[in-house]
């Protein structure tokens, strides 16, 4: 079991450290909203997989910086990765590539609203995969909280007339497979973090992020060089916005991984639904878009769900 230490803090701080997954997750969700906005603007010139690669390629150097700072302040050794670490890491890294690509692909699909609604089943699927693969235990109240928050975010994602698309096969498959991939990615990364031996949870999280981004960068860059060799050149030509997106991606991932080190992946991915509230706030203040009745209802359910999750 991962030692709940914050750079060798005394045992009396155990409870405080164990609850840090809450601010870690909220910070990560905020960073992810900003990263998605930047990444979305690059989908046009770079294509789906080119825009997906920038979060890995340009995020990797920042992950190295984060890890160096953690090692310097913690004094932890740099552990040698065990076999189990690689198995979990590859599960997390590869399924995240698939999930991100499918999400960006969905943004260009006319059934995006319905696809997004299915995509929001990620928290439920994470709970199932976390229990099956990691034995993550969730109380009945936490399961109820996950269900309430998921219903809320699905309602918020829908638009008038959008429900008609639920009868179509393409958005159903696209949304559910993307959600399953994101869920497996969360479980895989948590599995990798908790098997890193002999270091604090902060070091384990940063260590896993470095290896994860390295694998993702290598795999997707090799794919692009083989299938679309002009895209890497375009990525380098857009290095300024790509650098910003990479930093935001690494920043958000750093806090996701810190949260995964402290609690079940399902708890993290459910609380992460607050990103919907951030996105709604940005839409309201930037574009003066008023909230509809169903959006208000969905937001209320999200708040009830995440509030119950944190309380229990």
Image (cartoon, rainbow, N blue to C red):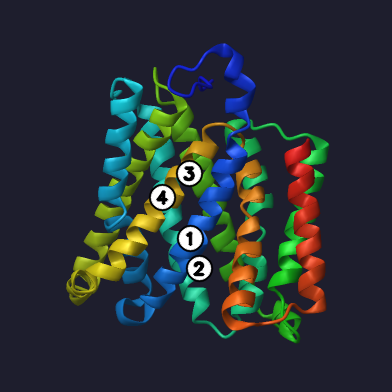
Q: Are marks 3 and 2 in contact (CB under 8 Å)?
A: no
Is 262 located above or below residue 309 in the figure? above
Question: Could you tell whether 200 is left or right of 157 in the image?
Answer: left
Residue 81 seen in the current view: no
Is 175 located above or below residue 92 in the figure? below
Residue at image coords 62%, 40%: 22
Q: Which mark is residue 251?
A: 4
Label 2 or label 4, whichever lies nearer to me, is 4
225 or 158, which lies in front?
Answer: 158
Between the residue at mark 1 and the residue at mark 2, the CA separation in whole angstroms equals 6 Å
Residue at image coords 53%, 38%: 260
Give the residue at mark 3.
Answer: 255
Q: Secondary structure at mark 1?
A: helix
Q: Quadrant of the N terminus?
A: top right
Residue at image coords 57%, 46%: 25
Give the residue at mark 2.
Answer: 103
Q: How many marks?
A: 4
Q: Are marks 1 and 2 in contact (CB under 8 Å)?
A: yes
Crowding at dot 2, Cα within 10 Å, few <14 / some 14-19 / many 20+, comes out as many
Crowding at dot 4, Cα within 10 Å, few <14 / some 14-19 / many 20+, comes out as many
Q: Secondary structure at mark 2?
A: helix
Mark with earlier residue (3, 2): 2
Between the residue at mark 4 and the residue at mark 1, the CA separation in whole angstroms equals 19 Å
Label 3 or label 2, whichever lies nearer to me, is 3
Give the residue at mark 1.
Answer: 99
Mark with earlier residue (2, 4): 2
Q: Secondary structure at mark 3?
A: helix
Crowding at dot 3, Cα within 10 Å, few <14 / some 14-19 / many 20+, comes out as many
Mark with earlier residue (1, 3): 1
Q: Quadrant of the C terminus?
A: top right
């Amino acid at each position: 079991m991962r030692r709940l230490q914050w750079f060798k803090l005394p045992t009396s701080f155990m409870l405080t450290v164990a609850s840090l997954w809450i601010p870690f997750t909220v910070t990560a969700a905020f960073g992810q909203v900003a990263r998605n906005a930047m990444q979305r603007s690059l989908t046009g010139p770079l294509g789906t997989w080119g825009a997906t690669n920038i979060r890995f390629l340009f995020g990797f150097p920042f992950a190295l910086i984060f890890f160096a700072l953690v090692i310097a302040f913690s004094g932890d050794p740099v552990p040698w990765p065990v076999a189990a670490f690689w198995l979990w890491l590859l599960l997390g890294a590869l399924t995240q590539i698939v999930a991100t690509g499918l999400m960006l692909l969905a943004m260009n699909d006319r059934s995006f609203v319905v696809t997004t609604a299915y995509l929001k089943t990620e928290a439920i699927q994470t709970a199932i995969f976390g229990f099956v693969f990691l034995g993550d235990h969730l109380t009945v109240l936490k399961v109820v909280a996950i269900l309430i928050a998921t219903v809320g975010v699905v309602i918020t994602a829908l638009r008038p007339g959008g429900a008609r698309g639920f009868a179509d096969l393409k958005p159903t498959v696209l949304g559910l497979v993307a959600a399953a991939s994101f869920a497996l990615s969360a479980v895989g990364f948590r599995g990798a973090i908790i098997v890193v031996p002999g270091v604090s949870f902060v070091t384990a999280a940063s260590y896993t992020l470095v290896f994860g981004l390295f694998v993702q960068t290598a795999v997707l860059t090799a794919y692009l060089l083989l299938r679309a060799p002009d895209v890497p050149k375009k990525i380098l030509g857009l290095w300024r916005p790509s650098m910003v997106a990479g930093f935001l991606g690494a920043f958000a991932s750093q806090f996701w991984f810190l949260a995964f080190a402290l609690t079940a992946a399902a708890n993290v991915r459910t609380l992460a639904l607050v990103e919907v509230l951030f996105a709604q706030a940005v839409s309201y203040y930037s574009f003066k878009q008023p909230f509809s009745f169903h959006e208000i209802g969905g937001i209320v359910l999200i708040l009830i769900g995440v509030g119950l999750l944190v309380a229990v």
